[in-house]
Amino acid sequence: MAISDSLQVTKTRIAAACVAAGRSPDAVALLVVSKTFPAAAVREAFRAGARAFGENYVQEGLAKIGELIALRGQIEWHLIGPLQSNKTRPVAEQFDWVHSVDRLKIAERLSEQRPADLPPLNICLQINISAEASKSGLLPGDVAALARQVAALPRLKLRGLMAVPEPGPGALAQHQAMAALFNALKAEGLALDTLSLGMSADLEDAIRAGSTMVRVGSAIFGARPPVNGA
C-alpha cells in the first residue's frame, strides 16, 4: 500500500477510535514515526498531508532535517528516543519537541542550549509506567517533582507525558494509569496538554484511555528496513 493510502487509513482509524471513546474525531494528533526510513519516505508522507515526524536517533534525525531543509518551516520534528547529555546541543538547536526527558540534567542542558531566536522547545517527560528494568523513564512517584522543575526552566515548554506501555493483557491498565497521572498533574496546576501514548498496535486502547497524540510508524511506512545488515 502506498504511504499516502496508509496515512489516510491511519487517520481514519484514529478518528474512529476517538468516536468510539466518545471524543471528537480530531481530538488526537498523529505523530508519524519515521525512524529508519529515508528522507524520501518522509517527503512522500509530507506530500500526503503529514506534518509532524518522530525520530528515535539523534544523528539520523539531524541528517533528515538537513536533507529536508527546504521543508523546515512546515515540518515539526520530534525526538522520541533516548537523549544523552553529550547530544543535547544539536537537539536543542534543531528539534521542535523532545518526548524522552527523564532527568533534570538533560532538561537544564536543553534549556541552556535552546537558541533565543527559536520558540521554546516543547518537552514531554518519559514515564516507565510498566516499571521495566530495560526501559528508560521516570517511575510515576518521581514525576511531579521533576515536572515542576522542568516547567520553571526558561526556553522550554513542558507539554506533557510520554510512555511506551508493555504489550500484553495489562496494556490497557497501563494506558489508564498514564492518563490518571497526566490528569493528576493538571489538577496540581501544571499546564499540560499532551499525553503522548499509543503506537500502531495499541492506539485504540491509548485513545480510549485519553491519549492526545499517537506515534505511528509501521502502519504507515510498513515493516522497518533491516539495521546494520540484520
Image (cartoon, rainbow, N blue to C red):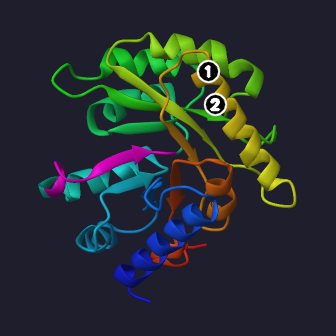
- Front in this rendered view, residue 151 or 212: 212
The residue furthest right is 169
Q: Which mark is residue 183?
A: 2
Whether residue 108 is in magenta: the answer is no
Observer able to see residue 62:
no
Compared across the picture, whether 102 is left or right of 95 comes to right
Asked if labels 2 and 1 touch by Cβ distance under 8 angstroms, the answer is: yes
Provide residue 37's location: percent of width, then percent of height.
41, 68
Q: Quadrant of residue 226?
A: bottom right
Compared across the picture, whether 204 is left or right of 152 comes to right
At 32% from the left and 38% from the top, the residue drawn is: 96
List the residue tagged with mark 1. Answer: 187
Given the image, on which type of amino acid does mark 2 rest? Answer: Asn
Indicate the quadrant containing the N terminus: top left, top right, bottom left or bottom right: bottom left
At 57% from the left and 18% from the top, the residue drawn is: 147
The 10 Å Cα crowd at callout 1, few under 14, some 14 to 19, many 20 or more, is few
Given the image, on which type of amino acid does mark 1 rest? Answer: Ala
Residue 64 against residue 181 in the figure, above or below:
below
The residue furthest bottom is 1
At 44% from the left and 52% from the top, the residue drawn is: 55
Provide residue 87's location: percent of width, then percent of height.
42, 32
Provide residue 9's location: percent of width, then percent of height.
47, 79
Q: Quadrant of residue 19?
A: bottom right
At 51% from the left and 63% from the top, the residue drawn is: 216
> In terms of secondary structure, where does tag 2 sit?
helix
Q: Which mark is residue 78?
A: none
Whether residue 73 is in magenta: the answer is yes
> In terms of secondary structure, where does tag 1 sit?
helix
Residue 210 against residue 221 in the figure, above or below:
above
**What residue range appears in magenta?**
71-80
Residue 34 against residue 230 in the figure, above or below:
above
Provide residue 49's location: percent of width, then percent of height.
28, 68
